[in-house]
Image (tube, helix red, strand yellow):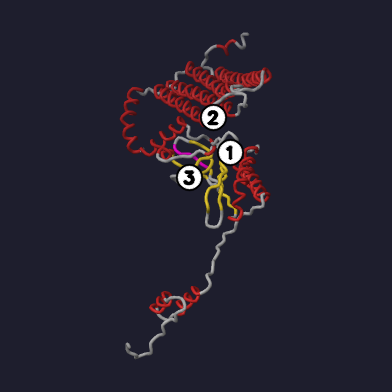
Amino acid sequence: MELIAPYFKLSPDPAIWTVQLLLIGVITICCNFVLLRLLDFFGRKEKKRHAPGVWDGALLKAARLPLRLLMWVGGLSAAVSLLHAIEPLWLHNFLLQARRVMLIGIAALFITRFIANMEKGLLRAGSGHRLPDATTVYAVGRLLRLCALAIAALAVAEALGMSISGLLAFGGIGGMAIGFAAKDMLSNFFGGLMIYLDKPFTVGDWIRSPDRNIEGVVEEIGWRMTRIRTFEMRPLYVPNSIFSNIAVENPSRMMNRRIYETLSIRYSDADKMAAICDDVRGMLEKHPDIANEQTIIVHFMTCNASSLDFMVYCYTRTTEWVPYHAVKQDVMLKIMDIVARHGAEFPFPTRTLYMAGGEGDAAAQAAMQAESPRQAMSAAAAPPGSAAPSRPAPGAGAQ
């Protein structure tokens, strides 16, 4: 005991305080090792206790790195305090401020990591949890992290001896100047905020705008711009302020997709139109992929130039693009079978020309063979059976 007793007291002897510094380092390393083993133990115990949920492991994962850093800050502070007790250091006050700043940073790191882990837990949660959509999770997570960083920045400023009231007053005056200089950025920020609040679309939605050439799948909604993947697989970056001034259509929220076609049969099959429309309507009402609760219209519509047209109007149960076209193909093929079963045909574009015969035809030929417009008019106006007037000889006078 007499040999180790001097090492528990402050001593200016370099041999003693060097050993004390080494002991502080060894204790810090051992505490880190024990801390990691405890965190791993509690993590395994939590996984075995119940099925993974939304918040499982968020706290332990968030605290893993901050606690290790806290151990090292504690060891460093103990070493600096030991050296200062042996011989006063002029850097001691600055080291105290640095320790406060590091503690604030560790606390901010823990909070931001905890928020990020909760965000990931919400996004990968199973269908048994009733959770908000991905856009809301991203928005709330970013807002909470921004608030945590702002509070940490103010705490750091106070730890460094700055006046928070003066800093806030400067921020109020400077905010006006920044607002005028960065009005476009602010408009994009508030445009993104409105997207998060109103939710006209979310991540993963297919959107299009009839006012602008914008169409694709939303990949990310940021505070300044929204990234959209077009159907050509190109990224499209749209500033959020644009969405405040344009109409946006969200086809992803359709309840059904519409089939609206105009089909035709020949004029010679006019007596079969009513039966064809009735059979097509009955087929649509019994089709498993057609929404019977929605409007179904199959009626003779109009007499076209070379066909009789009827309208087919209904809605599919699916809203997905590829299955919709498969259903539409099946419907169109069944309509073709119904038309063929009734002995009718779909017409080709045709034109019928009726040629008149007899004396009228002779008068028309005489008019076409006339050499002058006046003779053509005379030939066309001459009564049937009369001869067409001949052209007078050159130089002949009037009789």
Q: Is residue 242 left or right of residue 298?
A: left
Which of the two discs, 2 and 1, sits closer to the camera?
1
Q: How much space separates mark 2 and mark 3, taking CA atoms? A: 23 Å
User: Which range is magenta?
Assistant: 224-228
Considering the numbered disc 3 on the image, is that residue within a helix, a strand or a loop? strand
| Residue sitting at x 45%, y 31% | 198
Question: Magenta span has 226?
Answer: yes
Rendered position, 2 above or below 102: above
Q: Callout 1, which amino acid? A: Thr
Q: Nearer the viewer, residue 234 or 343?
A: 343
Based on the picture, tell me whether residue 270 belongs to the magenta stretch: no
- Residue 133 badge: 2
How far across and how far down the image is residue 181, in percent? Answer: 34, 38
Name the image quarter holding the N terminus.
Answer: top right
**Residue 293 placement (x, y as % from top left):** 58, 33
Residue 262 or residue 45, whichever sits in front = 262
Q: Name the residue furthest top.
A: 1
Gap in angstroms between the C-alphas marked 2 and 1: 20 Å
Q: Mainly helix, strand or loop, the magenta region?
A: strand
First in sequence: mark 2 vs mark 1: 2
Q: Earlier in the sequence, mark 2 or mark 3?
A: 2
Of the residues under marks 3 and 1, which one precedes in the sequence? 3
* Real-space CA distance between mark 3 and mark 1, rounded to the nearest whole angstrom: 20 Å
